[in-house]
């Protein structure tokens, strides 16, 4: 079957999905697309040519490339915008993409011999999509790729700014707890790295919150029992319905990986005793300098634990890959790869802990597999996720003071070797069990999937 035929035959409604073009946003959106396809919907994916997914992995979807498909458009030559880094395109397209998105949606709505369009589902950070959808009376749902807790903190940024947290320069107050979010410390707010004045990222976050509240519904990569107090607040404050669905338990993210995944280490991993390996990965965007990289390496070595370490090319500033490592570093204790099928690794019985940057996808995948965490967040939602896992659920150790080999080694041993680690592992197992119960018929996650399908079908 050709692509167009496969997406339409026997399918009575079409859903258009529009992910943000970054790995941590593409993964849950395509997992959601697979879930909706399995429920009978035809799927069309809008995407930029930048960071385009491997479409051959999704012959059952129709892909339309928009926004940056004109090579002569001089606006794209200005990227990255000053101070925006990797997210320059998000800022730019939110400013200039409305007309093109509206035109593309009109074409989909008028298309003949195709199922009618039920709704548009976009990443919540594509906040400009709300006005485009509204102009066509097309329901827009949003996918939030971070936690409910993170959303509530983001929604409170103006308040936190008014209270002086974003501009606080007194380092003596960093260990204080934030009155409005008692689980957080002041340094967690500071580590989010939003500025008080002229902050384009902060502005984008505030617009995201506003347009998420104006949407027809919110889909979360989470489950009720994980964030029940936060869900109560969201349901109270936002009229649109919320649907909490644990995507990693429905579909793997391997097929949406932008990087080639190394599988050559699995024979080695298969030979390791249960719960004996530390899996280390800091995501698809973060970088460290050479000094920090060597502290990580020495911390791993000093812990005396076996490890599987993902070092993405470009992870070390100024280095192509792992050139700064000392000769003979690995030995038999460790393996280093450029990228790995993370969900499969976390599900492996040999893995006993996950040292992570605390991005929400990684955090939630670890929760889904009952793997305790060691958290080294960089910015944005990551310090919030780290604090929630370490201080609310107590399934993680938070490395709060940067990259120090002694603290790294100690944290690894706390989880992997010490008596404290047994309690952490048990809490992680209990949390996984709560998730498994939610997936059974009558459970919160099971019911949320049914509710989402019924809601989309009602448009």
Image (cartoon, rainbow, N blue to C red):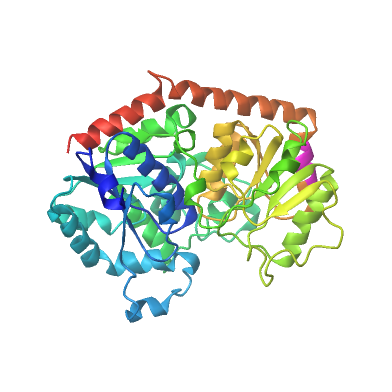
Say left or right for 240 vs 245.
left
Query: Who is closer to the viewer here, 350 or 452?
Result: 350
Image quarter for residue 190? Answer: bottom right
Residue in the image at 41% along x and 21% along y: 443
**Does any portion of residue 82 appear in the rendered image?**
yes
> Picture quarter containing residue 132?
bottom left
Vertical comparison of 142 with 74: above or below: above
Question: x and y percent of residue 250 in the render?
Answer: 45, 34
Please provide percent x and percent y for residue 27: 46, 48
Q: Is residue 407 visible?
A: no
The residue located at (49%, 45%) in the rendering is: 253
Q: Position of residue 195 (x, y in %)?
A: 48, 63
Highlighted range, magenta: 409-414
State yes or no: residue 307 in magenta: no
Q: x, y percentage for residue 330?
A: 82, 53
Q: Is residue 411 magenta?
A: yes
Depth order, front residue of 357/214? 357
The reply, left or right, for residue 307 in relation to residue 203 is: right
Dominant secondary structure of the magenta stretch?
Answer: helix
């Amino acid at each position: 079957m050709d692509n167009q035929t496969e997406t339409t035959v026997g399918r009575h409604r079409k859903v258009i999905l529009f992910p943000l073009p970054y790995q941590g946003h593409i993964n849950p959106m395509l997992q959601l697309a697979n879930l909706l396809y399995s429920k009978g919907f035809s799927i069309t994916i809008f995407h930029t040519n930048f960071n385009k997914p491997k479409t051959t992995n999704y012959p059952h979807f129709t892909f339309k490339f928009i926004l940056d498909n004109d090579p002569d458009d001089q606006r794209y030559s200005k990227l990255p915008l000053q101070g925006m880094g990797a997210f320059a395109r998000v800022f730019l397209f939110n400013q200039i993409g409305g007309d093109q998105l509206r035109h593309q949606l009109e074409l989909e709505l008028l298309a003949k011999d195709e199922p009618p369009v039920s709704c548009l589902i976009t990443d919540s950070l594509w906040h400009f999509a709300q006005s485009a959808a509204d102009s066509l009376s097309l329901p827009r749902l949003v996918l939030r790729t971070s936690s409910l807790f993170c959303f509530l903190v983001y929604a409170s940024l103006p308040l936190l700014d008014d209270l002086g947290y974003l501009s606080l320069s007194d380092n003596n107050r960093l260990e204080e707890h934030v009155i409005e979010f008692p689980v957080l410390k002041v340094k967690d707010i500071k580590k989010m790295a939003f500025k008080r004045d002229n902050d384009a990222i902060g502005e984008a976050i505030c617009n995201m919150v506003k347009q998420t509240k104006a949407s027809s519904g919110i889909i979360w990569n989470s489950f009720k029992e994980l964030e029940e107090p936060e869900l109560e607040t969201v349901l109270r404050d936002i009229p649109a319905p919320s649907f909490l669905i644990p995507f990693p338990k429905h579909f793997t993210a391997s097929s949406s990986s932008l990087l080639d995944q190394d599988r050559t280490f699995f024979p080695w991993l298969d030979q390791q005793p249960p719960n004996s390996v530390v899996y280390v990965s800091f995501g698809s965007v973060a970088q460290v300098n050479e000094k920090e990289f060597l502290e990580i390496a020495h911390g791993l070595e000093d812990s005396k634990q076996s490890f599987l370490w993902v070092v993405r090319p470009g992870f070390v500033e100024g280095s192509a890959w792992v050139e700064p490592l000392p000769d003979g570093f690995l030995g038999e204790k460790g393996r280093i790869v450029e990228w790995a099928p993370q969900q499969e690794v976390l599900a492996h019985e040999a893995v006993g802990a996950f040292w992570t940057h605390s991005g929400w996808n990684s955090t939630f995948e670890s929760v889904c597999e009952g793997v305790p965490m060691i958290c080294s967040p960089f910015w944005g939602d990551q310090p919030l996720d780290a604090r929630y896992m370490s201080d609310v659920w107590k399934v993680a150790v938070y490395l709060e003071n940067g990259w120090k080999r002694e603290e790294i080694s100690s944290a690894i041993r706390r989880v992997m070797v010490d008596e404290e680690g047994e309690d952490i592992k048990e809490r992680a197992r209990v949390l996984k069990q709560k998730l498994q119960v939610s997936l059974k018929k009558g459970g919160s996650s099971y019911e949320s999937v049914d509710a989402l399908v019924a809601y989309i079908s009602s448009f």
